[in-house]
Amino acid sequence: MTQWSGYFGLILQGALVTIELTLMGSVLALIMAFLAGMGRLSRFLIVRAIATAYIEFFRGTSIFVQLFFAYFVLPLVGLELTPLQAGVLALGLNVGAYAAEVVRGAVQSIGREQHEACIALNLGRWQGMRHVILPQAFLVMLPTFGNNAIELLKATSVVSLISLADLTFQAQVVRAQTGNTMVPFTTILVIYFILALLISWGVRSLERRLARGLDGVRV
Amino acid sequence: MDWDWDFVRQIMPTLVQGVKITILATLLGSVLAAVVGLGIALARRSPNKALSRTVGWAAEFIRGTPLLVQLYFIFYVLPDIGILLPPLVAGVIGLGLHYGTYTAEVYRAGIDNVPRGQWEAAKACNLNARQTWSHIIIPQAIPPMIPALANYFIAMFKETPLLSAITVLELMNQAKSVANTYYRYLEPITLVGAFFLVISLCSVVLLRWLERRYGKIER
C-alpha cells in the first residue's frame, strides 16, 4: 500500500514553491512592465531604444532558453544565481516584456482630452501621468495583467528543469518513487487549474473595486 | 570564459539537426492547432448544451494548466492506459491541443465578426447549416483571423524547447547534449537564444505584412 498522504505532502510543498515563484515573478514583472512600458513612451530616443530592445529580446526568445541562459551561462560571466533567483529573474523579465506592451497600449488608449486637461491644469508631465493618466490606464491594464499572471503561473513549471522543487518537480519525484504516473500528474494539473482560477477571480474582484465610482466615466 | 568560434563550427551540424526537428514540430503543431481550434470553436457554438459546456470547460482547463505538465501527461500517463506514443508525436499532440484552445478564441472572434446579414442571406437563399458554414461564414471569417493565428503559431514555435523535456531531439535538447558533452554552456545556449531571436524578429516583419494584407475587416 502506497503512503499517499506523505506524497501528497510533497506535492503541497511544491505548490508552495510554485506560489512563491508566481508572486515574486509577478512583482518583478510588474516593475519591469512599468519601467519598459513608460520607457517606450519617453521623450528621449535612447530610453525608447533601450526599452524596445528589452521588450523585443525577451518576447523574441522563449522563457525556457532564457531560464537556461540565466542558470547555466550567467555563472560563466561571474554572476552566480540560485535556481530560485534564476527562476524569478527569467520569469519576471520575460512576462514583464509582454506586460510592458500592455502598459504602453493602455496609456495610449487614454483620450487626448485627458492630456489636454493636464496641460490646462498646468500639471507637469510626471504629475499628469501620476494623478490623471495612470489611474485610468491601470483599469484598462488590469484584465490583461490577469492573463499575464496566469501565463507566468504556467511558465513556472519550466523551473522544474533547473532542479527547483516546484509542483512539476515534486510530481516527477512522486512518479519516480511510486511508479504511478496518473495520480501525481492529474493532481498537479488540477492544482495548477485551481491556482489559475484563483488569479482570474482575484483580478476580477480587484477590477470591480477599482472601478467603483467610475461608472459614468468609463465607456 | 571566452567565445570560441572553432567550437561553434564544430557543434553547428548537430544544432542544425535540432533546428529541423524544431521546425517540423512547429509546422505539424500549427496544423493540428488550427484544426483543433476550429473543432472547439464549432463545438462551443453547438445547440447541444451538454456538448458546448463540456468542450468549453475542457478548453478552459487546458488553457489554465502548463504545457510542460500536459506534455508529461501525454508522454508518461497515456502509456498506462495502453496508448504508447513516440516523443515527437506526443509533443505535436501537446502543442496542437494547448494552442488549439487559444486559436479557438481567434476563430470565435472571427466568426462573431461576420455580420448578421450574411447569416440571414444564407437562410434566405435556403442554404442548410453545412452549406452556410462552408460557403458563406468560413470564407469570410478566415482572412481577418490570419494575423492572430500567425501570432499564436509564432508563440508555439517559441515553446518548442519544452519538447526536450519529453526527449524529443529538437534544438534545445541537442544544445544541452553538446553542452553536457564538452562542458561548455556559453556557445550552445547562446546560439539557441540567437536562433530564436532571429526567427522571431523576422516573424515580426511577416506579421506586419499579414496584418496589412488580411487584417482589415470590411464593413
Image (cartoon, grey):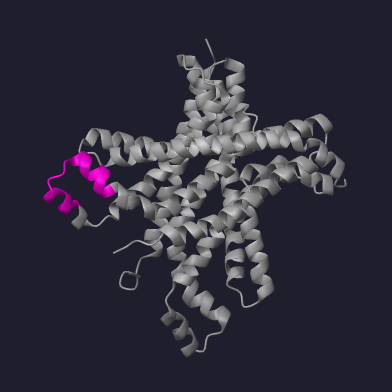
Q: Residue B43 lies in what quarter of the image?
A: top left
> Magenta residues?
B119-137
**Image quadrant occupied by the C terminus of chain A:** bottom left
Residue B53 image point, x, y percent: 28, 37
Queried whether the magenta region covers residue B177, the answer comes back as no
Residue at (65, 34) in percent of width and height:
A161
Residue B110 placement (x, y as % from top left) = 34, 52
Question: Foreground residue, B139 or A34?
Answer: B139
Using the rendered view, name the quadrant where residue A45 is placed. bottom right
What residue is drawn where x is 52% and y is 80%? A128
Residue found 52% across the figure and 19% down from its top: A4
| Relative to A161, B119 lies left or right | left
Which residue is farthest top? A1
Residue A80, placed above or below residue B55 = below
Question: Quick check: B8 left or right of A54?
Answer: right
Predominant secondary structure in magenta? Answer: helix
